[in-house]
Amino acid sequence: MTNKTVHVCIIFMKLSILSLFFITLLTNSILASNAGGQVLGSKISVSIGNTTADKAIEKIAGSTGISFFYDAESLAQIKIAPRNYRNEPLVNILLAFFDRSPVGFKEEGNSVVLFKKPVPITPRKDPKGSIQGTLRDAKSNETLVGASVKVQGLNAGTSTDVNGNFKIPNLPGGIYTLVFSYLGFKTATVTNVEVQPGTITRVDFKLVPNEGQLSEVVVRADIKLENTTERGIIKEIFESRGVISGISTEQINKSLDRDASDVVRRVSSATIINDRFVLLRGLDPRYTLTMINDFIAPSSETDSRDFSFDMLQTNTIDHISIYKSPVPELPADYVGGVVKVTTKNTANSRQIQFQTSTQFRPGSSFQDFYTYKGSKTDWLGFDRSYRAFPKDVPGFFELPAQRNQAPYYGSRGLFEATNKASWNLQREKANIDKRFNLSYYDSWKLRGEQVLNNLSSVAYTTTRQNQYLKGAYIPGPFVDSYRIDTTSTEAVRISLMENLTWVINKNNSISFNNFLNQMSDDNTLVRHGGGDGEFANSEYAKAVQFRYRSRTLYTGQLNGKH
């Protein structure tokens, strides 16, 4: 064997030994890794009671022989809920123990190390900077109010206040360009404005007036009338010191209510009796106080202070508030409650509003309607003395009590004495209900700050309604009778409003509010009667009654605000 061959064999042996060493090292690492993964993946069964984490780990270590390294004081602070684990991987058990705690775990060989999780470090945000300054007129050195200040390239900007100052906050550090503009001045640009984080950069600038002639600027605006909305009523209820309910003009306009009694009927805890009087909290209407525009309303009855709410048309009402408990700003002479009606007010505008509506009444509209020929002014809500008795007809207490005492007027004779042959019963078809409303707002500028605002409004409503009463049995001395009543009612409502407000200045004004309501109810009652026996199914009796009622309500108020 030559020396060269021996040398090659020695080199080959060295390479084989080195390869064997690396293979052995890699195998040990893999085995160690597999052995470590088997610790957390091993399935165990253990019953944990209501205890702390250190006691639970001791119990697992005692039953499995797995070594744990941990800080006992830290684990003693953690409560473990009772639970039974059956063939559960150790990693799942530890996750259940420390799911919401700052404790983590990892394998180290055949052991498990419990450690405190590092607190994540929140990256610190750089503070924002801002630009502020004052904008002036380069010629007069006066501050400019309402000038536009924008940051070029960014959706950021503002306008100057009453002192000409401006401020643009929350700008990241950098170099910016500002653009200043104002009506009647030349637009200017300021470049290289440096903003440092957490600092304020001051920029004061003067705009040069534009000497050129300005073109005409026409400003058009629609002035919205300030009526009470649903939100306004809720705010009034929320801020009140008493228990109140209310309804706004927004809700009134959505309904077809013709008068205030229909409106109040929609308010909780309020009941309408006789279609016109308000009953609050179950007490008699005389215990209810009615106020119109903060003044006590006049009574519509002769023997009580009851107020007839059917005399107020809905077109004149702005809102209604019902107070059910005492409050300091109201009079104390009520027990049931207070109904405050606020009418519509003037506005600094010029507008004309026209509203119309119709209503179909089942059983009345386009059905037979009983009536008679009345006065030519019935459609205006009043009688022009057409229904008055002649002068020679005696009064009630002057009528003779017996037939043999002359002059005697029976029901027929009294009827004929009025010489109204046209009062014969008529039958025609009833039309649908009709409502019209026209409001005119205007405003005139007087001397200086003085302004005169006006509201003129007229509303007209006419309705026809039938009411039927059938099968009303009346016991009699010889035979029981029955009756069938048909009542046809034609109602007319006319409402006029004229409100004037003299605005002296922003702190003083005088108002003169007037509204007039004229209404009438024309009732025609036709009664048919019959009985048993020989009168069965026969119309042996018939009665006709005419009843006309006309009412007028005027309210005028002079008040001021100072």
Image: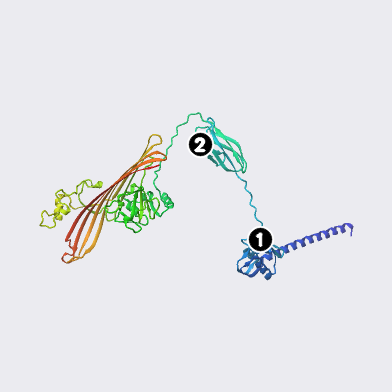
At x 57%, y 43%, the residue is 169
Query: Residue farthest to the right?
Result: 2
Query: Tag on residue 163?
Result: none
Q: Which is more N-terminal, label 2 or label 1?
A: 1
Which residue is found at the position 18% from the left and 49% from the top?
A: 388
Where's residue 115, x and y in %?
Answer: 68, 61
Q: Which mark is residue 104?
A: 1
- Residue annotated with mark 2: 145
Label 1, secondary structure: give it.
Answer: strand
Residue 180's x, y, as percent? 54, 36
Q: Along the line of sight, which residue is nearer the eye, 323 or 85?
A: 323
- The amino acid at mark 1 is Gly
Amino acid residing under circle 2: Val
Q: Regarding mark 2 in the picture, which secondary structure is present there?
A: loop
Front label number (1 vs 2): 2
Q: CA distance from mark 1 to mark 2?
A: 62 Å
Q: Do we see residue 495 in this rendering? A: no
From what the image shows, is residue 70 above or below residue 455? below
Q: Residue at x 87, y 57 (%)?
A: 7
Q: Quadrant of the N terminus?
A: bottom right
Q: Position of residue 340 (x, y in %)?
A: 36, 50
Vertical position of residue 436 compared to residue 142: above or below: below
Q: Where is 556 relative to 90, above or below?
A: above
**The one of 42 and 75 positioned closer to us in this rendering:** 75
Q: Is residue 413 left or right of residue 315?
A: left
Crowd around label 2: few <14 · some 14–19 · many ≥20 (10 Å)? some
Looking at the rendered structure, the number of numbered marks drawn on it comes to 2
Residue 383 drawn at (x, y percent): 22, 47
Relative side of 421 to 47, left or right: left
Query: In the image, is 342 to the left or to the right of 151?
Result: left
User: In terms of image quadrants, where is residue 171?
Assistant: top right
